Image: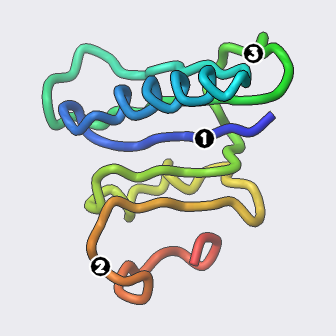
Amino acid sequence: MKEIRFHGRGGQGTVLASVILVKAFTKEKRYSSAIPYFGFERRGAPVTAFLRFDDHPIREKTQIYSPDCVVVMDPALKRSPEIYQGVKEGAIAIFCTRKPMEELNLPPTIG
């Protein structure tokens, strides 16, 4: 099973992105599930969404603590420590930005 954790802000489409990927995996005849995580915050507040996909049924419905991939919708969040918590060795990090990788100043665990 592969796990993806999305980080963004309310209104950026973070939860929608995870749902769209679930639909894409379903069309590819794979099992997947998306779990949004947010409180009563309004637009602009931090939002996290979780996505799992596999070739076998997925029963786990919890948050993702050790993702294989992290997607950061808001480049301003790149300094937030919770984004990098539990990230597996060799994980993929995707940042929605126009800056080249060298200019992102990522922690050594990601770069």
Marks 2/1 in contact by CB < 8 Å: the verdict is no
Question: Which mark sits nearer the N-terminus, 3 or 2?
Answer: 3
Q: Residue at x 33, y 59 (%)?
A: 96
Residue 102 occupies quadrant: bottom left
Residue 91 occupies quadrant: bottom right
Q: Which percent across, then down, holds residue 25?
A: 62, 28
Q: Amino acid at mark 1?
A: Ile
Depth check, front residue: 18 or 88: 18
CA–CA distance between discs 1 and 3? 14 Å
Where is mark 2, residue-wise? 99
Q: Amino acid at mark 3?
A: Glu
Where is mark 1, residue-wise? 4
Q: Residue at x 67, y 53 (%)?
A: 87
Q: Which percent across, then down, holds residue 51?
A: 59, 30
Q: Residue at x 68, y 38 (%)?
A: 3
Q: Which mark is residue 60?
A: 3
User: For numbered disc 1, what is the local secondary structure?
Assistant: strand
